[in-house]
Amino acid sequence: PEWCKRASFPPNQAAAAEAIASTLLNSLEVVGVFGIELFLTADGRVLVNEIAPRTHNSGHFSLDACATSQFEQHLRAVCGLPLGNPSLQCAGAVMVNLLGYENSQSDYQSQRQQLAAIPQAHVYWYGKTESRPGRKLGHVTVLLNNHNQTTAQELAQTVESIWYPS
């Protein structure tokens, strides 16, 4: 698939990932968006970690970066409508989940404002009033103007340094 080429997967690992996805989707007769989280082991094996028969947090970047988001694609598929164009509308995107790291009642307004100040950042807050370690409270997507891996990693580190205390 195209995503494997963009991510620089070796052909044998891309083929393994595609075979796993095809087997799962066809066996379950899936209609709509279906998340399949795969792990690549140190010895090159592709393993399934999680399946999600729904839109998935790993695809939330599509809200801002793609012509058609995963949410719209899901609705189109289950309604029998033609699928939309899934292509990226930018060079790339960095998405970071905003997880709770403490037990509190904070809405983290200051951190959210700092994240929103990052150029081309889109902050999504899920309106949860209680934070606890590991609870997903939101996410932030930053659109990229180029394919520079270093820039992407630096942006992810910037987001994490704003969100998580030292």
Image (spheres, helix red, strand yellow):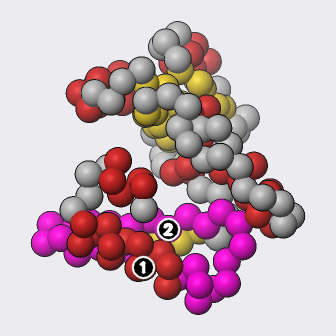
Residue at 42% across / 20% down in the picture? 145
Distance from disc 2 to disc 1, alpha carbons, whole Å, reads 9 Å
Q: Is residue 65 magenta?
A: no
Give the residues drawn in magenta, as a range. 24-49
Mark 2 element type: strand
* Amino acid of disc 1: Ile
Residue at 48% across / 46% down in the picture? 133
* Amino acid of disc 2: Ile
Q: Would residue 140 appear left or right of 16 to someone viewing this image?
A: right
Q: Provide residue 70's location: percent of width, then percent of height.
A: 66, 50
User: Crowdedness of circle 2 by 10 Å Cα count: few (<14), some, many (20+)?
Assistant: many
Q: Where does the C terminus fall, quadrant-wise?
A: top left
State which mark lies toward you, 2 or 1: 1
Q: Would residue 165 appear left or right of 11 to someone viewing this image?
A: right
**Marker disc for residue 119:** none
Tag 1 residue: 20
Q: Is residue 140 above or below residue 23?
A: above
Q: Provide residue 58's location: percent of width, then percent of height.
A: 51, 51
Check whether the beta carbons of the residues at disc 2 and disc 1 lie within 8 A of each other. Answer: yes
Residue occupying the far right of the picture: 79
Q: Provide residue 35's location: percent of width, then percent of height.
A: 55, 64
User: Crowdedness of circle 1 by 10 Å Cα count: few (<14), some, many (20+)?
Assistant: some
**Marker disc for residue 36:** 2
Q: Is residue 48 above or below residue 107?
A: below
Residue at 45% across / 33% down in the picture? 93
Res 131 quadrant in image:
top right
Residue at 26% across / 51% down in the picture? 8
